[in-house]
Amino acid sequence: MEKILEILKELHPEVDFDTCTTLIDDNILDSLDIVTIISELSLEFDIEIPPQEIIPSNFNSAQALYKMVEKLS
């Protein structure tokens, strides 16, 4: 979880990723951010994120990203 928070904070240091659950819904993350996150997670956790996992609910919070990474690991 710490590495995921680190990746997110590098993109948007002003956001409280510990509590925010509307990263996509509130347009905090844009498409370029999503591509960056996918790339970073793939490298860091040695996973492949298939297109069917690239949905708003998997990117709306750090917790959702963590669950996706766990599922794909």
Image (tube, grey):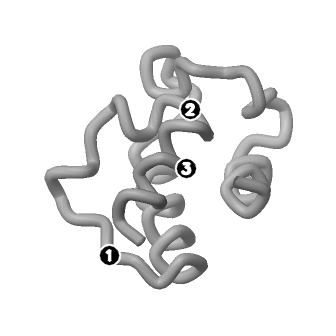
Residue 2 percent coordinates (x, y): 78, 56
Q: CA distance from mark 2 to mark 1?
A: 19 Å
Q: Which one is in front in this view, the residue at disc 1 or the one at disc 3?
A: 3
Q: Residue at x 74, y 22 (%)?
A: 19
**Number of residues whose C-alpha sits closer than 10 Å to that of mark 3, classed few (under 14), some (14–19) or many (20 or more):** some
Q: Residue at label 1? A: 48
Secondary structure under tag 3 reads: helix
Q: Earlier in the sequence, mark 2 or mark 3?
A: 2
Residue 20 percent coordinates (x, y): 67, 21
Q: Earlier in the sequence, mark 2 or mark 1?
A: 1
**Number of residues whose C-alpha sits closer than 10 Å to that of mark 2, classed few (under 14), some (14–19) or many (20 or more):** many
**Residue ranking furthest to the left:** 52
Q: Which mark is residue 61?
A: 2
Q: Which mark is residue 39?
A: none
Q: Residue at x 48, y 29 (%)?
A: 60
Q: Nearer the viewer, residue 16 or 3?
A: 3
Secondary structure under tag 1 reads: loop
Q: CA distance from mark 1 to mark 3?
A: 14 Å
The amino acid pointed to by label 2 is Ser
Q: Is residue 69 above or below residue 8?
A: below
Q: Is residue 2 above or below residue 58?
A: below
Q: Is residue 20 above or below residue 9?
A: above
Q: Which one is in front in this view, the residue at disc 2 or the one at disc 3?
A: 3
